[in-house]
Each structure stands twice: as C-alpha cells, then as structure tokens.
Amino acid sequence: MAYQNKNRTIDPKVDIELKNKILAGLESELIQKNVEYNSKAQYLNKKTAEMKLLKGNIAYIKKSIRKIKASITGDNSKKELNKDMSDFTLLKSRVEFNKKLYIQTLVKLEETKVLVSQNTKNLIVVTKAGVADSYSSPNKIKESFSILIILSFLYGIMTLIFTIIRDHKD
C-alpha cells in the first residue's frame, strides 16, 4: 500500500500495458494525419487554416507520443528502465513468499494441534481421576491379626534368646 500510494499506481504492469495501447493508438492516428496532410498538401496551400490545423495536430500527437514514451521508459532522473516495474515485481514476490510462509505455518500449527489432541486423548484415558465407592485397603481385621501373629513370633524369639543366655551363665 505504501508503495502504491508513493508511486500513485495500483500495478505498474497494468499502467505500462495501458500506456502501450494509448501509444499504439496515437501512432496510428499520427500515420493517418500524416497521410491526410500529405494528400491535402498536393492540392491545398500549406498556409490555409485546415493545413495549419493538421500540422498542429501532428505536432501535438508527436509531443504526446514522446511524453508517453518517456513515462514508460523513465525520465532522465531515473537511470534505470522500468525501475518502478522491477520494484513492484520485487514487492509482489516478497508478498507471495510471505503468504506461502504464512500458509505453511498455519498447516504446521494445525498438524501440531492434531498431534496434541491425540496425545491428550490418551492421557485423559490413562489419568482419569475418580473417587472410590468403597475401600478395599486397608483391611483392618486382616492387618490386625497379621500384626498380632508377628508380635507373638517376636516375643517367642526374644524369650528363647533370653532363656539361652541364662542357661549359659549358670
């Protein structure tokens, strides 16, 4: 947009094509006017109003052709031929590149979203949280009985050790 506002053109290629069409029309009109002038010069005096008008039209058409050719190829301040066209083409290619880069980035983003959603589905199934309806552990009666048996064995072993020690002292 900044380029278009600065150079007052939408697309330099379209401008050049339009100027070429205008130039072709002016050149064909110049040829017609020259033929008409030469044919009338054979039987009319060159100082008549009609001949002066034709000569003025021819001069104006030539001036217009020079002006259009200068605007197409660039004036003297611009050293390069069609500098605007090359600048615009460069900008256009940058826009296309950025557009393709943006599209690829969006595609990669969508692929990543799909992968993440697939992985989260697995995680949701594996790590599904829930509150137990009833407890299966600790089983108080079984654990209490096991502790009682273990303590009884320990008491028996300790008693046996103390008895052996007393027998050896005597």
Image: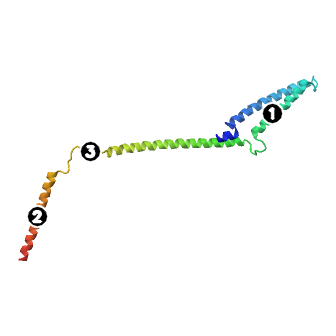
Name which quarter of the figure residue 68 lies in. Answer: top right
Is the residue under label 3 in contact with that under label 1 (CB below 8 Å)? no
Amino acid under disc 2: Tyr
Residue pictured at 71% horizontal, 34% vertical: 17
Amino acid under disc 3: Val
Describe the element under mark 2 as helix, strand or loop. Answer: helix
Tell me if residue 44 comes above or below residue 161 in the rendering.
above
Describe the element under mark 3 as helix, strand or loop. Answer: loop
Query: What residue is disc 3 on?
Result: 131
Residue pictured at 65% horizontal, 43% vertical: 90
Query: What residue is disc 1 on?
Result: 64
Residue pictured at 36% horizontal, 42% vertical: 121
Q: Earlier in the sequence, mark 3 or mark 2?
A: 3
Tell me if residue 122 comes above or below residue 164 in the rendering.
above
Q: Nearer the viewer, residue 108 or 49?
A: 49
Query: What residue is disc 2 on?
Result: 155
Give the Cα separation between the discs numbered 3 and 2.
Answer: 41 Å
- Residue 157 rendering spot, x and y as whole percentages: 11, 66
**Foreground disc of the pair 1, 2:** 2
